[in-house]
Amino acid sequence: MFDELMGKVTSLVMLAGDPPFVVARGGLSGLFPDSSFAAYSLAVVVGVPDVIVWCDVQLMKDAIGICFPDIKLQNASNIADVYEGKDKVYLVNGVPTQGWFPIDYTIKDLATVSLTQGVYSRTNKFDGIGFAILTVEDMITQVKPPGLWLNIQHDAFYAQHNLSMRSYILSVSRTVVVSYISSPEVGFLRSIAARFNPKVTKLVFRFLKQTEIEPTTNQTYGSLLGNLTFITTFASGILVPKDYIWPIDASQYLLPHTSLVADAHKEGLEVFASDFSNDVPYSFNFSYDPLAEYLHFIDNGDFSVDGVLSDFPITPSAAIDCFSHIGRNASNQVNLTVISKNGASGDFPSCTNLAYQQAISDGADVIDCPVQMSKDGTPFCFSSINLIASTTAAQSNYSSYAMTIPEITEVSESGIFAFNLTWDEIQTLTPSISSPYTQYRLFRNPNFKNAGNFLKLSDFLTMAKNSTTLSGVLISIENAAYLAEKQGLGVTDAVMMALKDGGYDNQTDLKVMIQSTNSSVLMKFKDNDKYEIVYKIEERIRDASNSSVEDIKQFADSVVINKESVFPLNNLFVTGLTDVVAKLRAFKLPVYVELFSNEFISQAWDYFSDATLEINSFVSGTGISGVITGFPKTAARYRKNRCLSKKTPPNYMSPVQPGNTSTGGPPAAPPPSRNGQPRLAGCIFLSSLSMLLATLLLF
């Protein structure tokens, strides 16, 4: 019993008892070309102070080592253009492989070859900059990483071509401290084990896919996993794909975690997890929130890994330093109202009982009800007047009701409208989760895509009143004039009656927010001083004149604006910061911003594919009063992060600072200098990264 308890304690605090390490794979390779000077430098700037920089070592024809993510140079450089038709076929781990290989070129040959983004779903805006391929020595000298990790992936391949990776690594270690050396080849690690002091340089055995064959032992990596004692004879740690620890099923939902971390710690092995990328979804359990994924590996109540290998080191840095081991009842560090968008619509069909229950559980302060009217005059909560939006109405018996109504929808948009069906008929419809980014194959919580029931406004108000954590409700009213004039349905009166019947018009426990894009609708509620009247501005605005704000003050108490009215974008990069929020706040109008989503495709590149970093830029950088989101858990957790209480926030919790913008994109770079590093004097980059990069790259 005591041994079991101690084993669990050891696992919880990790092997060394220190916070997990952040290992930046190729630097900040999620944004910049892998292994480029910018990627490495920015990883050091935005990561934790002891961030470890990862270099995949490849050997050139002249036995010089370079940092490059793949043995095939065309995968992350423009070598195919520079040396067109010079590709060859070699055996790599016994498999004929075609490409441009480092063993055919000297470092001088690569002087005109530049690095590119090797992942096509990521921005290519930095491909034309001219980032040179760095030698290992140049990277160390120029970047000066706090910690250095050299990964040797293909020792056997280089040995076949009379190049000694062992000799090269030993040579490098004589002039610089190498924190970690990893390899998936047992033979290579055995060959160097006696030459390194494990207190200075730790050797790490890298596990590949469980079905792949390790060349030295001729065993699968899966079988080697069952003999960790053997690993301890030549390594002090293991690096494993994250699914070795948290496997997922065929539907991309988490299975119970394995005992690998605890087992390895009992053997005295450090455990590092790999394959972390903010823009490569892993499990639907994380709701597209990369920070939540990291916390599953470092703060789950059972174990913590000793480090994570990430393309986006800024996110695990924030996870470890700002969010780990914060209890659910921790105090908020910032005053921010979290308002749901159709409930927790990122996890359940919009405006269903499950979406609202989840929003309350996730820590939303205010849940919202966009009010629609049924044919028989029942007000209910639904995301759109068009029932096709979030139901299976188009596949139901009511498909013949489809029509176009230019007054309330796009001219070509066909709809089955709420006012065409009675409430009883609407209740027969099956909810359908809204997945706005399906064209990128980013689906929301498919196991629950048709779960839940729709709610009448009265039931919604009762649910909110029964909650012990909510501070308010937001009632949204649109299309009031059309409904009254064309359908004979008084949505405004129906809302007033529901609020009165629910006891909301004379209580102060729950704030009532009435939202509309129509000032005439809001004026009808203005006389009730217990309601907060919220004016929604749908258009993207760049300025707010004093006279316009004074007009808004006549009928509204607060304003909702969209994200681009705060941070305008160009090619998905932030180009500046407007003064809209400042102007509205100067007139004492609280400002709520929408719509925040966890999917990385909804965010500007400046936020490193991390919803938490995006929220931080809006809150810390502009002073908004609240956020509107279909993922309230992310926003509610943000408020508790301990870094907000620091006098000087760390770089990984600092807001975006928009810089100068080149609308035409980055200019072509001049030729590289003699040491292979491009001279980029005067280079102006897109986005808020411009000033930082200019500092990094001005020589």
Image (tube, rainbow, N blue to C red):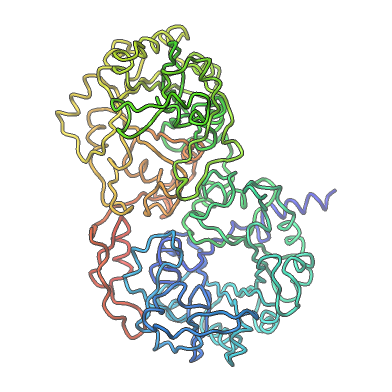
Of 550 and 425, the residue lying toward us:
425
Compared with 114, 662 (above or below) is above
Residue lying furthest left: 547
- Residue at 49% x, 90% y: name it: 61
Of 102 and 270, the residue lying toward us:
102
- Horizontal relation, residue 452 to residue 313: left or right: right
Compared with 74, 484 (above or below) is above
- Residue at 26% x, 46% y: name it: 577
Mark count: 0
- Residue at 68% x, 84% y: name it: 191
Residue 100: percent from the left, percent from the top? 48, 82
Whether residue 362 is visible here, answered yes or no, is yes
Residue 256: percent from the left, percent from the top? 71, 47
Whether residue 200 is visible here, answered yes or no, is no
The image quarter in which residue 229 lies: bottom right
- Residue at 61% x, 52% y: name it: 298
